[in-house]
Image (spheres, helix red, strand yellow):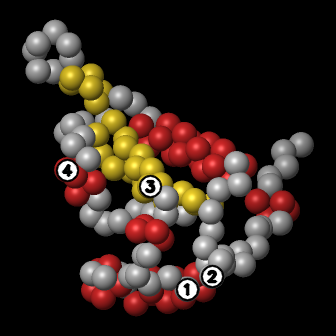
Amino acid sequence: YENYHGRMSERWLEDLKPFDTNHLKPHLEEAPALIVIFRQSWTPVEDGSGGKQQHYYVQESVGIAAGMLLNALHESGLATLTHTPSPMGFLSEILGRPSNEHAYLLIPVGYPASNCSVPDIERKNLEEIMVEIH
């Protein structure tokens, strides 16, 4: 509710209109499964020093892995929707995750409801996105 009534700019809300979205998210309660993907930016060094081993390219790696998971779910005949609530820190707390893990993406998974609406979004033509080098 807070995002749609104060946090988001008027422009952002206007850009969301074609997607028919609002603060009501019943799919988060009705989906038979919710997958929470966490990113892990570091791991504790095991020598007892309290040091941290930094992980690199975390955003990229987790994004690729999430995309592969979404594709596999769709190929299995399931419906998904990516959701990034803001803030997401509460997910770490309620799921008991360590401080080096941060919620990245929430994915409700299941079969689509009979009354669900899917935006009719056209893909760009290949000519619009491809660059040929000769």
Residue behind mark 3? 34
Judged from the image, the secondary structure of the residue bearing numbered disc 2 is loop
- Which quadrant, please, contains the C terminus? top right
Judged from the image, the secondary structure of the residue bearing numbered disc 4 is helix
* Distance in Å between CA atoms under marks 1 and 3: 22 Å
In this view, the mark in front (4 or 2): 2
Judged from the image, the secondary structure of the residue bearing numbered disc 1 is loop
Q: Position of residue 7 (x, y in %)?
A: 29, 80
Q: Mark 3: give few (<14), some (14-19) or many (20+) Cα within 10 Å.
A: some
Residue behind mark 2? 115
* Type of the residue with mark 4: Glu
Left or right, residue 123 beside residue 36 = right
Q: Mark 2: give few (<14), some (14-19) or many (20+) Cα within 10 Å.
A: few
Give the vertical position of 122 relative to 131 (above or below): below
Whether residue 133 is visible here, answered yes or no, is yes
Residue 20 numbered tag: 1
Q: Position of residue 24 (x, y in %)?
A: 40, 81
Residue nearest the viewer, comparing 3 with 94 = 94
Residue nearest the viewer, comparing 75 with 130 = 75
First-in-chain label (4 vs 2): 4
* Distance in Å between CA atoms under marks 2 and 3: 20 Å
